[in-house]
Each structure stands twice: as C-alpha cells, then as structure tokens.
Image: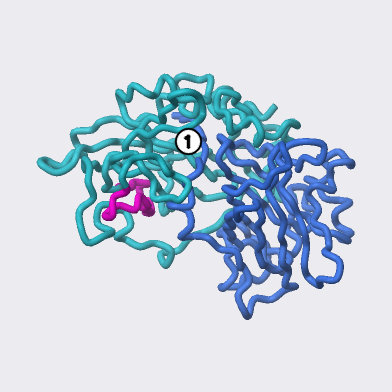
Amino acid sequence: MTKIAGYQRPYPGTQPNHLHPPYVSSIKRAPTKPLIPMPHTLTEVTGPVFGSESIDAKACDLTRQHGGEPLGERIIVSGRVLDENSRPVPHALIEVWQANAAGRYLHKVDQHKAPLDPNFTGCGHTVTDSEGRYRFVTIKPGEYPWRNHYNAWRPAHIHFSLFGPAFATRLVTQMYFPGDPLLSFDPIFNCTADEKARRRLISIFDWESTVPEEALGYQFDIILAGRDATPWEDSRSHGSK
Amino acid sequence: MSLQATTSQTVGPYFSIGLTRLKKDNLASTGISGERITISGRVLDGDGAGVPDAMLEIWQANSHGKYAHPEDTQNKNLEAAFQGYGRILTDANGAFRFQTIKPGSVAGPDDKPQAPHIAVSVFTRGLLRRLVTRIYFPDESANGGDLVLNLVEPARRGTIIAHKVAGKEGHLEWNVILQGDKETVFFDIGL
C-alpha cells in the first residue's frame, strides 16, 4: 500500500477565509459553497521544479534593471524560507512585485496620480540558498490609494510568490513594514482572526542586514506548510473542517 | 519547534508585473509524447462577468502518468522536455486557453490509479488565498472510481469534467465559475 505523507493543514484563524466582506472584491469572487476537503495524493505532494535556467542572478536587485537609479529609499529585504517543522526550504523560487517609491505600479490598470519611475519596474525573483536564505535589494514601495472604501489606502507592501517543494505548499503573500499607520485600517492585512498570524506579515527592521551609508535592512521569514508526520486518514490535521 | 505557515494574501490587480515572466500556456513542445489537447474557457464572477485579472496555474503528469518531481517514485518514463507546469493569465473577457497533452493516470493513496486529471490553482484580485480545483476528462471510464471525484456530490462533478467542443478535435472546454448554481467545485487541501 502506497502511503502518502501529506502536508499540514493550517491552524484555525491563521489563514483567511475566501469571503472577507471588508475586502469588497471578495464578495463577487469568493466561492459560496463549502470547499471539499480532500487528502493529499501524489498530485499534491509533487509540484513544479524550476531549474537554474529559470533564474537570472541579477533579478534579485530591483535597483539595477535600467540605465539610471530608481528614486526612493534603498532597502535590503532578506530572510529565510522555512517549513512548519523549522526546516529550511532550499532552492525555493521567490517572485516579487511592488509599487515604486511614489506608490505607483507599472501597470495599465493603475492610473492614480503618482509618477511612474523610468528606472523602476518593480519586478524581481531569486532562489533560496542551501539554508533557505534569500536577499533582495529594492526601494521602499510607497503607500497608495484604492477604491475599496472611502479614502482607502494600502499600507506599503511587497508581494511575494513561492512554490516550495509541492503543489500543496504554494503560497502568495504580502510583506509589510513596521510602524506603518495604515496597517490597522487595511482589510487585506486584517483578513485573519489570529493577531500573531497578522504580525508575522510585518517585516522586522534589522541592523545586521543594514548596509552603512547605503540601505536599511528588513528581515522577513516565510513559513511554508510542513510535512505531516502521519498519513491523512489518521493524522491530527488541524482546521480542515 | 513548530511554526505556522505564513498567512496567504491576495495577488491583487497588478500581479502580471511579477508573474508574467514564467507564463506558460503551451506545456507540450514538439517531441513530447501523448494526445495533444487544447483546453479553453472563462473565469466568471458572481455576476457572470468575465474576470480579466485571474491567473491559472497548472500541474500535471506526463502521458505516462509520471510527475517531473523527485517524490514520484512510480516506475514510469520521464520526459526531460515535459515539466508539467503551466501559468495562464486571463484576457480582458476572462478567457484563457492552454495547450498540453492529456496526462496519464497516476497512483492514488489507496493504490488504485487516479483518473487522469490536471491540478489547477486559481488566483485573482478578491481571493485572499488561491482556489484549488482539478480538470478531469470526458468519456473516461476511470472517472467512476476516482477517489477525489467521488468526494464530490454527483450533481456537481460535471463542473470539474471538461467538455468536448463539437467539431474541434482535441479541443476541450472547462470554465471556472466562482459563484452560483453552477459554481465550480473547489477543494480544501490546506493552503
């Protein structure tokens, strides 16, 4: 009998529901019928593998993609990708995208009155090393208005996308900055009941990765689903109901 | 020590900036073995309107039923040129289309083969976490015994079985309906 060790299910309150009415876009897009719980099969415990041919080593520096220097405050964003069992996730592809220093995205849908920066695209990627470490050089993104509710503003954030080792570990998230006054008003940041889960989305200002006279360092560790010790049928999986 | 997985957040409306680089809507380059198929459809919201800012990600086995992944220890042939990964962005009408090969059957946890299927993640503005679903194939006798398909009430199974397109050989239609009577079946696999 082939036993498949699946991945752990999230703790209650640590992951958003699909429907979160304060985030207005979820109202017409979140499913209305309950999700159907299913075991992890070979399909879910495998997933796309990206070789070195998919990685451009220069893409981890978002400030060096054009002829000139982008405007804004240079920052270093670094951290580790770990699983829930505290094991580093090596060779994990990380894709990032963000607004420029003025809070404008290089995207046709973003038409708000802030300037584009000809020296900043806001797109990068990298891969974790053998200890799960990654590092990006970029500029601090600006806050920007959106139309979710009257006078709505998104706190400054960087989008992160990771595959991890399996289809079951796929994660897209956003990293925020400490002390941002907009965090308490943002329905996307506040999508989970668990306060500690929210706090983990906020990067930590970090002297060790700060480069003197060059860039402030922010630390952001990302945790992917970890392997379950036991097969699905008799596991102590939490929160799948 | 036990950690907790990072909270998922929406891809938002601007993900194409960061995610277009690894777009892939033709999984089956020349030389790949198997039956070539084109799958197309639309992503529709609760008003029946097309979702122009959605992204589908595909994960599938090759025509022998083997995943290009080290944990697939089945004694079946790998094909170096077949990765099994796809990423498709919807157009202004919420439409998508990709070309691939029909996957072979892979082992299930009960040692009974699973019916051929493609795993799909759906991302869009408005979804704080992805939606997970599968595409099964029409006229496939193995569907009746498939462990995952049998978790779905019979009336809803049709939402995850692609339809043949009349007069177009190798062409299948499959839609992602986010809400309503014909809502697509979505699975809870954790994250």
What residue does disc 1 label? A85
Q: Is residue A228 visible?
A: no
The spot of residue B106 in percent (x, y) is: 73, 58
Decide: is A114 above or below B24: above
The residue nearer to you, when weighing A7 against A222, is A222
**Secondary structure, magenta segment, majority class:** loop
> What residue span does the magenta drawing correspond to?
A116-135
The spot of residue A31 in percent (x, y) is: 70, 34
Which chain: blue? Answer: B
Amino acid on which disc 1 is placed: Asn
Whether residue A129 is in magenta: the answer is yes
Classify mark 1: helix, strand or loop. loop
Decide: is B60 above or below B168: above
Query: What chain is tagged by disc 1?
Result: A
Image quadrant where one finds the C terminus of chain A: top right
Whether residue A234 is in magenta: the answer is no
The spot of residue B187 in percent (x, y) is: 71, 40
Q: Can residue A88 be seen in this view?
A: yes
Q: Which residue is drawn at 66% across and 71% down?
A: B77
* In the displayed structure image, the side of residue B96 where residue B125 appears, left or right: left
* In the displayed structure image, the side of residue B27 where residue B187 appears, left or right: right
Figure quadrant of residue B61:
bottom right
Which chain: cyan? Answer: A
- Callout 1 crowding tier (Cα within 10 Å): few <14, some 14–19, many ≥20: some
Figure quadrant of residue A91:
bottom left
Q: Residue at x 37, y 52 (%)?
A: A123
Decide: is B32 above or below A161: below
The spot of residue B137 in percent (x, y) is: 81, 59
The residue nearer to you, when weighing A159 against B151, is A159
